[in-house]
């Protein structure tokens, strides 16, 4: 199978939204009047972001999901994407499920594959997404104000627990003596789904237009990504670790996992996964306390749970407290490729 057969067979689909899709030197998009184009790229590198033997269907899903998550964080509606792919070989048994996993998510969001590039080389997937958002309504990192509430969507920490399991299985755990959360098989498999097939919170981002003052998606860990909002907004925050704790502990199906997570010994381990584990692709956002009812209505309309985890302060820096407002040491670190 040659390069162009491969593109035709796996990556050429109808693109009714685009003026021109795959096949020419450029694709053409026509933004609707009054709309800004929202553009973002994310690259997934083999052995860096995923194991080379991961299921290609879930890899296809994840490669697009992490990009849609950036559109969600801006409150943008997905329109189209390009796919730059470096592949060790043109293997239809791998490309078929990879393309299916990616296109199933693309179709669910009306996001059209309009072009890309295909080369031979180490497995590497780079996607650029294009979305649209009404002018002046994009959710930015820079709009948080003192007194705003801080919310997180969905659940946090599961993807990072699943990664810890995989690393341990492969004996690549950075420190095998580190405390470890042994979830029940059912809870581990749902955690694995969170790692391998994250759900981009697109509907929530759109519902929060005009309500949220700032937003970011959580790819590198809550504290790090909230830190970006604080820095860009020039303010600080106080975060309640007791409500953060429920982001992981509250949604267990098995009593075995629930009891384990509730134990005093596991508390700091759970918090580490919740506060600094990456790969969740939830949204962290801020909104004025006076608009709390609108925030709840937006979450309901988007069928997405949200949890209030703290408050923006005029004073810079990030402070952690326990459920009674007493200070908790912050010795958590978010992911950084070059740290
Ligand atoms: P060029 O030589 O101008 O860079 P290519 O020969 O690389 O163009 O690609 C031919 C067409 O196929 C272009 O429209 C390009 O956007 C598209 N294309 C290439 N790779 C992919 C891919 N992985 N997914 C979708 N479209 C692709
Ligand atoms: Mg060309």
Image: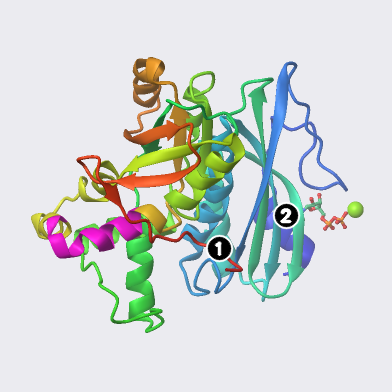
**The N terminus sits in image quarter:** bottom right
Q: Circle 2 — which element?
A: helix
Residue located 16% across and 65% down the image: 265
Q: Which percent across, then down, holds residue 174?
A: 41, 79
Give the residue furthest to the bottom: 171
Ligand 1 positioned in quadrant: bottom right
In the picture shown, does residue 25 fall above or below 325? below
Residue 336's disc number: 1
Vertical relation: 126 (above or below) 146 = below
Let me know if residue 291 is in the magenta part.
no
Residue at image point 66% right, 20% down: 136
Q: Nearer the viewer, residue 294 or 244?
A: 244
Percent position of residue 201, x then y: 46, 37
- Mark 1 and ligand 1: say if the CB distance to the nearest ligand atom is below 8 Å: no
**Mark 1 against mark 2, which lies toward the viewer?**
1
Task: Kindly give the residue lying farthest to the front in the view shown.
Answer: 315
Which SS class for mark 1? loop
| Mark number, residue 8 | 2
**Does residue 117 appear anywhere in the picture?**
yes
**The magenta stretch spans which residues?**
262-274
Secondary structure that dominates the magenta span = helix
Q: Quadrant of residue 238?
A: top left
Instruction: Give the colouring mode of the picture.
Output: rainbow
Badge 1 or badge 2: first in the primary sequence? 2
Q: Residue 297 location, x and y as percent?
A: 36, 19
Residue at 40%, 60% (x, y): give it: 332
Residue 200 x/y as whole percent: 48, 42
Q: Quadrant of residue 263?
A: bottom left
- Magenta segment includes 270: yes
């Amino acid at each position: 199978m040659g390069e162009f057969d491969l593109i035709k067979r796996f990556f050429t689909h109808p693109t009714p939204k685009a003026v021109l899709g795959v096949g020419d030197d450029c694709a053409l998009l026509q933004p609707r009047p009054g709309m800004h184009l929202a553009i973002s790229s994310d690259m997934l590198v083999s052995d860096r972001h995923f194991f080379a033997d991961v299921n290609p269907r879930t890899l296809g899903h994840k490669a697009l999901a992490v990009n849609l998550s950036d559109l969600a964080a801006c409150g943008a509606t997905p329109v189209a994407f390009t796919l730059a792919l470096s592949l060790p070989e043109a293997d239809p048994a791998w490309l078929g499920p990879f393309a299916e996993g990616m296109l199933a998510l693309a179709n669910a969001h009306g996001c059209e594959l309009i072009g890309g590039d295909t080369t031979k080389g180490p497995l590497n997937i780079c996607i650029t997404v294009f979305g649209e958002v009404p002018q002046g309504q994009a959710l930015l990192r820079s709009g948080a104000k003192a007194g705003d509430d801080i919310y997180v969507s969905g659940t946090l920490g599961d993807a990072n627990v699943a990664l810890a399991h995989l690393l341990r299985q492969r004996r690549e755990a950075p420190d095998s003596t580190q405390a470890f959360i042994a979830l029940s098989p059912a809870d581990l498999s749902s955690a694995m789904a969170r790692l391998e097939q994250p759900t981009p919170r697109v509907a929530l981002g759109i519902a929060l237009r005009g309500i949220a003052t700032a937003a970011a998606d959580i790819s590198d860990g809550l504290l790090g990504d909230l830190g970006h909002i604080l820095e860009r907004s020039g303010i600080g925050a106080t975060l309640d670790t007791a409500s953060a704790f429920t982001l992981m502990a509250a949604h267990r199906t098995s009593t075995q996992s629930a009891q384990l997570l509730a134990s005093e010994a596991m508390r700091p381990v759970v918090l580490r996964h919740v506060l600094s584990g990456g790969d969740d692709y939830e949204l962290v956002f801020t909104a004025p306390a006076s608009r709390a009812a609108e925030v709840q209505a937006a979450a309901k309309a988007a069928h997405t749970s949200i949890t209030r985890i703290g408050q923006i302060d005029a004073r810079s820096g990030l402070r952690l407290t326990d459920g009674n407002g007493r200070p908790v040491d912050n010795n958590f670190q978010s992911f950084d490729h070059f740290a």
